[in-house]
Image (tube, grey):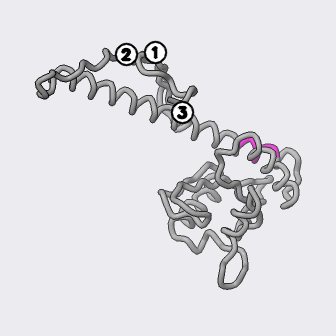
Amino acid sequence: MHPDIPKFNTPFPYTRGAGGGAITEKTCKCSGATPGRRSGTPDPAGYRDTEAATRVQAVEVTVRLQQEIDHHLKLLELLRDHLRGNGDFSITHFTTEADRLHARWPAFQAINWIAPDGRMLAAVPGVANLTAGQSPETNQSLNVMDVQDAASAFRRALTTEQVAATPPLDLRAGGRGVVTYLAVHDDDEIRGVI
């Protein structure tokens, strides 16, 4: 088991992340599972304990995953605030700051700088994601507005100034994932989208 994930039978605080809701603390404890009978017939009480333990572990993993997602979204908000505070929205400055962020938190598959019209301007980390951001036919920058699920979330980010996410989709860099967009406003002007 990963050291950051709470061990079974250990009190674990349940908290709800940035999505809203009350913050409460509960303690999860389950009795251990009892082994099945030697005759090969399962012990119903043992299965109930195992089922309860599995449910608790599923909740713990869900909570931990939500905390990680909330943490990474907060990091993107900090990057946005830094860009606004600095007033430098250049590709070079974005790439420098996003590289620093990615070096400390490599769980980000990519941190992209996207123009308000949807064109991908920069991708961190570089080569694999930059290649993913190029159209193989024209070698030009891809536009998130050309992908239906991405376009919907992108437009939401532009209008709400909040993080907007796609449903799970096939990523250009490979695999499936959820893409989040966060618009960077400077006064009333949208400078780009992370």
Residue, x 45% and y 16% (percent of image)? 10
Question: Per the image, is 79 magenta?
Answer: yes
Element type at mark 3: loop
Amino acid beneath label 3: Gly
Q: Residues within 10 Å of mark 1 (few under 14, many from 20)?
A: few
Residue range of the region highlighted in magenta in the rendering: 77-82
Task: Name the residue that disc number 2 marks.
Answer: 29
Mark earlier in primary sequence (2, 3): 3
Question: In front: mark 2 or mark 3?
Answer: 2
Amino acid beneath label 2: Lys
Element type at mark 1: loop
Task: Name the residue that disc number 3 marks.
Answer: 17
Q: In this view, does 29 lie to the left or right of 10?
A: left
Residue, x 23% and y 21% (percent of image)? 35
| Residue 129 place in picture, x, y as percent | 69, 63
**Which SS type dominates the magenta stretch?**
helix
Q: Would you say the residues marked 1 and 2 are in contact, meaning their CB atoms lie under 8 Å apart? A: yes
Mark earlier in primary sequence (1, 2): 1
Mark earlier in primary sequence (1, 3): 1
Task: Name the residue that disc number 1 marks.
Answer: 11
Closer-to-camera residue (41/123): 41
Asked if one can make out residue 190 in the rendered structure from this viewpoint, the answer is no
